[in-house]
Amino acid sequence: MVDNRVLSPIKIALPKGRLLSATACFLKEAGIDFANYDEQSRIYRLRSPEHPFVSAKVFQEKDIPVQVSVGNYDLGICGLDWVEELVSKYPSSPLLKVLNLGYGRGGIYATSSKFGGIDNFQKLLDQRHSIRIATEYPNLAETMALRFRLRRFRIFPVWGAAEVYPPENAEIALLWAEDETEVSAQNLVPLKNVLQTSAFLVANKVSWETKDLSWVAGIFSSALGRRSKPWLKIRPGAKKTVNGFRPNAQAGKIWLALPDGHQQAPTLEFLNRAGLTLEGYSLGVLDRRPKCAIDWLCVKVIRPQDMPLQVANGNFDLAITGVDWFLDHIHRFPSSPVTKLLDLGFGRVKIVAVVSRDLRVYDIAGLRHHVESKKLLVPRVASEYVNIADKYLRDNHFSRYKLIPTWGASEAFLPEDADLLIENTQTGRTLAEHGLRTIDTLFESVACVIGNKDSLKDPEKKEKISELIEIFSRVTEGN
Amino acid sequence: METRPVSQRCKGARDLLPEDLELFRHIEGIFCRSCSSWGYREVRTPTLEYLSLFTAAGMLTPSMLNRVYSFLDWDGWSGERVVLRPDGTIPIARLYAENPSRWKPARLFYVTNVFVFEETGTENRERWQCGVEFIDGSPPGADVEIMALAVEILHNLGLDNVEILLSHAGVLKALVQELKLDSDERARLLDRVLDGDWATLAQIKSYEPGVQEFLSLVLSSKGMRSAFVRNLRSLPRLPQSIESALDEFTRVAELLDALGISYRIDITSVRGFEYYTGVCFQFLCNGRRVGSGGRYDDLISLIGGRSVPACGFALYMDPLMALVSGGKEQSGDKRVVVRCEEVTPEYMRVGFTLARMLRKQGYSVEFSFADFRSTPLCRWLIKIRGKPEEFLVVDKESQRRRKVRSIDCVIDVIGGEQAFGR
């Protein structure tokens, strides 16, 4: 087919992670092959050699509905779950669901533990006390809670590992799963399917109403009409753990949260040096409830970002996280009963303010002057640390700015999707590679032990906590 | 022409300018005085409440809950959300539940803002209302009292063509109860009907024959007298729950007939608020809804208080401000402008002393300093000039003027106790 129309540039936001492989396959079959769109690539800006008027950028899936809504991209591909997560809270978002691409099928399930006393949906509705919901989808959770008329509920947004929270840290985990069988395989009870999801092509409403996007929509539609659909056969390898935890009498026990992800290796090394051996917390093995030799110590592995909130709510007495996440929490909730007990010395990073090298700005005052002289109207600030970023801009007398929460890979946001980045860096090399300039260092972050102030008021717990802190201190002092 | 700067007001928010606020205070004043003269006492609740106060079944419908301003505040680490007050009645019920033995019964009123998200931003998202709650007051007396009070307030505001639309939430709830539905489905059906979709009810075919006839009569006829409710009550094969709702409805309607308060009965006019259990009413003026209310006997026990009958209503400030006239600035006769020829310590001392004395006499006094270009609207202008203690009093109405040499003389002249000279 020869298309003689002059096509204006089309910008597409494409997902990383779960949907990447199937999306890459679908795009190729549909006739638009982006170079370097694969799991291994660390290139975020993509071009199609044969169709130069189409450009793409790779984002975390949950960033895509936001990016398309604000008009940075005309089109985007992501799961319906993330679309609904945005639209359920902000119904006037200018986001249109254009095509159901059919792959990446699954559902959002309200799940509970077999051992938590809520093993069917009616029991959930009948609960009189407050229901804690752990989820990566806080807006969907609120919509669900209101729809089902839960009398009292509290939502704990988590960065991941929602499945490990029930029963002792949450009554409900609201999470994505392929089907009920997958939920059951995790030893959880599927109480209700809240949403059926699959990958969607979404469009910015203004782009759809004013711009010719028919070429993309057209090749997508014709691919969907074909008999052979190899992209449907690609299924994401979900990394989920089994939650067979049965609560027992836990009086006097100390709960410690340990980090997964990048922080796991240095934490493991530190614990080894402290002589604390944990069965199931070694690299390559993901047991979210490792066993500890100390019988009064219970350990659970969650995301370091989620720890301060979890400690504040008494789900854990102690946690090993970073000063960055501790401060981000305290800036948001000054009355939180979380306190920092000990710096551990490893995991040292700088929290820095970063701009694109194209911007002639060399310090934060310079950026403010840039704004005051109207060269930049409302600066867009992208960060994983929204509360740190917010405070930093307030403290530096920025009167108007837009905060864009991100979920990793923030460096790709500059310059086209953000003007300022608040990001952590070890050496600054990645930032330099992306053509970025560091204009300020906010503070240095290091791994630390945080604790719940109320736990420290309990004499029995206090003694055990002191004992652990002493063990850790011996290692840090030996440094 | 002067170009206006781009507005920095939040979408859906508005400013009240002096003229607006004078009208606002006029309406508020009439409302408060009327309520006080009926033995009601004013209360005020906080702007922030916990979201959980409004989420329980029987409170706000999900479609209303989806439009509340809820967020995590500085204490939000516990996950407990707070909300900008989305409704006037529920906080009052909470206040009563927390102060149970203070009043018996509690006749309370309030003037408050409620916050409701509205997508276009063309309507106000912060809305003011004047509310009345009669707690521990049983039907039919309390219902009729508050309706008569509302009618009197509207009359005092100069709105005499007020139409009352009457209904009974108990009839609707009994109808939904007649369907054999599980609690989830029943809640969802009730939500739809409360959002105004009564047709949904009529489409359901699983009713008993008596209920089916009743429903089609209710959907197709409106009444003007208590007789209409008695006619409905006379239908055969009605379930007990509908009969008792209709009995209560009849008693209220009869009392309204006796007081000469006219109304229109439309059973389908129950809207929005899930907490109503008995008679519900709306006030319409020139086709605009200016207020609504009803009986909510379960609300206080749902919040955790003891079970007490209660009813109330709210009048809406936005439509009232569009309909009511009055509240203009006080007449010019009481307005005085004092003009100092120079801004010096001597002039200022004399000027401020004169102003204080005049204000004590009930005048509203404004200064006009020598560098002001225009004189504000007023009847009296007093110029302090030349040697201090010389005053020129000008009556702008009659264009007469007189020189006097003391503050007492000024007061006598403008008070009419000393005549003007030539």
Image (cartoon, rainbow, N blue to C red):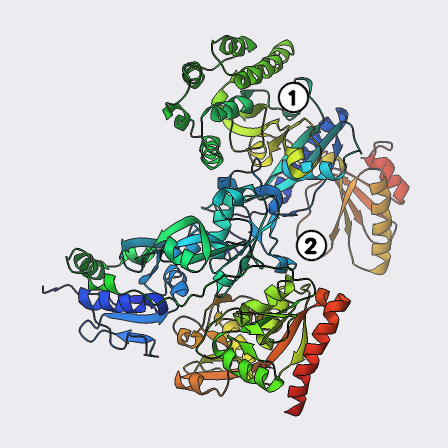
Of residues B296 and A260, which is closer to you in this image? A260
Of residues A432 and B295, which is closer to you in this image? B295
Q: Residue furthest left?
A: A1
What SS does tag 1 mark? Answer: helix
Q: Which chain is indicated by disc 2?
A: B
Instruction: Same chain for labels 2 and 1? Say yes or no.
Output: yes
What SS does tag 2 mark? Answer: loop
Of residues B286 and B67, which is closer to you in this image? B67
- Give, as a three-letter code, the residue at label 1: Asp
Q: Position of residue A419 (x, y in %)?
A: 45, 73
Is residue A25 visible in the rendered structure shown here? yes
Of residues A3 and A133, which is closer to you in this image? A133
Q: Position of residue A374 (x, y in %)?
A: 48, 71
Q: Left of B228 or right of it: where is B85?
A: right
Q: Which residue is mark 1?
A: B143
B159 to B321, vertically: above or below: above
Q: Quadrant of the C terminus of chain A?
A: bottom right
Q: Tag on residue B412?
A: none
Query: Counting residues from the N terminus, which is met first, the one under dot 2 or under dot 1?
Result: 1
Q: Position of residue B94 (x, y in %)?
A: 69, 39
Q: Left of B392 or right of it: where is B172?
A: left
A408 to B320, vertically: above or below: below
Residue at x 62% of width, y 42% of height: B113
Q: Tag on residue B372?
A: 2
Residue at x 55% of width, y 33% of height: B273
Is residue B124 visible in the rendered structure shown here? no
Q: What crowding class fits label 1: few (fewer than 14 Cα within 10 Å), some (14-19), or many (20 or more)?
A: many
Q: Position of residue B283 (x, y in %)?
A: 56, 25
Label 2, label 1: how far apart the Cα atoms are? 57 Å
